[in-house]
Image: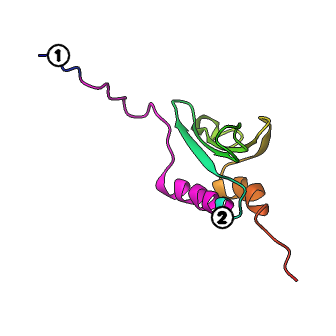
Amino acid sequence: MGTVTPFPVPLRGTQIGFERVELTRILDLYGRMVAAGHWRDYAIELGRDAAVFAAFRRATERPELRIEKRPALRGKQGMWALIGETGAVLKRGHELGPVLAPAERRLMKLVE
C-alpha cells in the first residue's frame, strides 16, 4: 500500500479573503454587469497579501476590472482598490461601496 501524506493546512491569518457581506456586494455588481452584457467571466485569487476579484469581458482576455482587498493598506490609503484593465488604480478607499461606484455608474441609463 501507498503512504498517505496529509494535505498541508495553512496557518490562520496567512490567507486574505473576502467576508460574506463583501463578496455578496461584489457578486451583486457582477450579476448586474452580466445581465447588462458587459462581463462574462470572473476569477477570485486569495493570497497572503491580497484578495482579488477579477471580472472579464471574455475569458481569454485580461480582466476589465479588478477589485483588490489589501488589509496592509488599511491605515494608509484604504484597503480597497478598483484597478482598470491597464493596471491603473481607478479608485481607492477605506470602504467597498465608494470604490465600486465607478463600475456601478456604467449600469446607469438615462430615462426620459
Amino acid at pointer 2: Ala
The x, y position of residue 109, in whole percent, is: 82, 71
Task: Name the quadrant containing residue 71.
Answer: top right
The residue that disc 2 covers is 35
Q: Are marks 2 and 1 in contact (CB under 8 Å)?
A: no
Direction right: furthest residue: 112
Amino acid at pointer 1: Thr
The residue that disc 1 covers is 3
The x, y position of residue 1, in whole percent, is: 11, 16
> What stretch of residues is rendered in magenta?
6-33
The x, y position of residue 45, in whole percent, is: 54, 37
Task: Using the image, determine if residue 16 lies above or below residue 1.
Answer: below
The x, y position of residue 8, in whole percent, is: 32, 24
Q: Secondary structure at mark 1?
A: loop
Left or right, 70 with reference to 102: left
Mark positioned earlier in the residue sequence (2 or 1): 1
Task: Using the image, determine if residue 49 lies above or below residue 90.
Answer: above
Left or right, 84 with reference to 30: right
